[in-house]
Amino acid sequence: MTAHEPRVLAINGSPHREGNTAKVMRWVADGCEAAGAVVDWFDAQSAEIDYCLGCNACLRTGQCVQDDSFAELYERIQVADGLIVGSPVYEGQMTAQLKTIADRLALLTLYAGVLQDHWTVGVATSGVAPARPLARQLADLFGQRSGFVGLRTASLRAGQLPPSVAAGVRGIERAKAMGRRLVRDIENGRTIPPMKAVWIRLLRRRLLPRLVMKTPGEFAAVIEIWRDRGWL
Ligand SMILES: Cc1cc2nc3c(=O)[nH]c(=O)nc-3n(C[C@H](O)[C@H](O)[C@H](O)COP(=O)(O)O)c2cc1C
């Protein structure tokens, strides 16, 4: 149970601020707000976030060496209890904008579990390809999956459709219900599935510490986060 109103951050990985993906994300956000959450919104396209340099400095310092919009995004992620992460399907994958954000988060996510306590709804839209696999992947990549919404916006019969028509009233209601469920998961502190929990514990308490303690100086920030969380 959170001591404050649940806070949800929506990260839109589409180049279109008002595009198909943003519209579906907005339905999920409406559901979150209806359930009492405050929703913050981040458009990847309006931010300046450069590629990960692969320098590993974040493991040592807890921060990226690059001076760009990522620092602000990282702070907004840290104060959020849950995330809505969206992308259009580009060549079967997430957009380069969102992948860049995933890369910039990757090492602290893997080693220090910075997204481990975030419940997440993944959203993907596509033209004709299935969108659900990417939506599901986003929910798993950016925290713990609360749910996912994939919407295909074109059909051979009807051509290109606006998201509201492609989804229909039931699709919009399902997306809103996903938002309400995200807030319930945050408030109830829903526990992650037992097998996944066992794997995370094994990784964080046994496998990674062995690796990290071989060169502790390289992982100073990770070790500090583990100490704060009582993992060491
Ligand atoms: C560069 C590019 C690549 C795309 N690749 C695919 C694809 O592989 N499969 C697909 O079904 N749709 C593809 N699309 C269509 C978009 O996924 C679809 O129109 C999406 O709803 C756009 O969302 P947006 O309005 O948020 O940008 C592509 C669109 C662009 C511009």
Image (spheres, grey):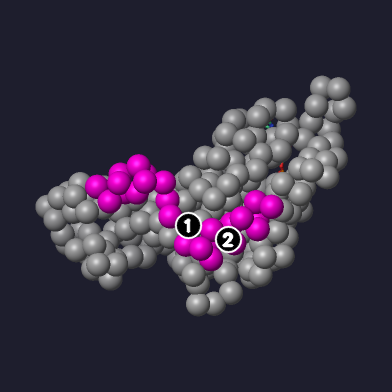
Nearer to the camera, 60 or 24: 24
Majority secondary structure of the magenta segment? helix
Dot 2 falls on a residue whose secondary structure is helix
Dot 1 falls on a residue whose secondary structure is loop
> How far across and down, in percent of the image, does residue 72 sit?
51, 68
> How far across and down, in percent of the image, does residue 117 sit?
43, 60
Mark 1, residue position:
190
> How far across and down, in percent of the image, does residue 128 sit?
72, 28
Pointers 2 and 1 in contact (C-beta within 8 Å): yes
Lateral position of residue 222 relative to residue 33, left or right:
left
Q: Amino acid at mark 2?
A: Arg
Ligand 1 image position (quadrant): top right
137 in relation to 154, above or below = below
First in sequence, mark 2 or 1: give its number.
2
Which of the 4 image quarters holds residue 39?
bottom right
- x 14%, y 55%: residue: 213
Q: Disc 1 beta carbon < 8 A from ligand 1?
A: no
> How far across and down, in percent of the image, does residue 217 sit?
17, 62
Lateral position of residue 46 relative to residue 193, left or right:
right
- x 87%, y 27%: residue: 158
Nearer to the camera, 161 or 74: 161
Q: Amino acid at mark 1?
A: Arg
Lateral position of residue 117 relative to residue 19, left or right:
left
